[in-house]
Image: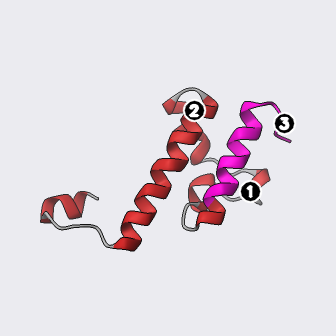
Amino acid sequence: MTRRLSERSRLTPAESDRAVRFARIFAHAVAMIGEEEKAVQWLLTCSRALGGERPLDRRDTDVGAREVEDVAGRIAYGVYN
């Protein structure tokens, strides 16, 4: 994003998709966890519910992003195991 802003050029469709997916995951994590700082920490921490991967590492596909949102929702409602 920073590089594109400095070049004053548009994102490619793939870059736009990744940026929107990341924004969606981050917003969902903040909404479910309650605080931005805790949401960032959670996104960067390995999760058993995601096979030992960090939630942030699942953002590359829409399926992975939906899995992250599902886990965040389970945490918010106390169903996380």
Question: Where is residue 43 drawn, in percent x and y?
Answer: 58, 46
Residue at horizontal 61 percent and vertical 41 percent from the top: 42
Which residue is nearer to you in this view: 72 or 42?
Answer: 72
Using the image, determine if residue 4 lies above or below residue 70: below
* Helix, strand or loop at mark 1: helix
Earlier residue among tags 2 and 3: 2
In this figure, which residue is indicated by the disc labeled 1? 50
The reply, left or right, for residue 40 in relation to residue 63 is left
Alpha carbons under labels 2 and 3: distance apart? 16 Å
Question: Where is residue 71 drawn, in percent x and y?
Answer: 73, 46
Disc 1 residue type (three-letter): Leu
Residue at horizontal 22 percent and vertical 64 percent from the top: 4
Earlier residue among tags 2 and 1: 2
Earlier residue among tags 1 and 3: 1
In this figure, which residue is indicated by the disc labeled 3? 79
Q: Which mark is residue 31?
A: 2
Q: Are marks 2 and 1 in contact (CB under 8 Å)?
A: no
* Helix, strand or loop at mark 3: loop
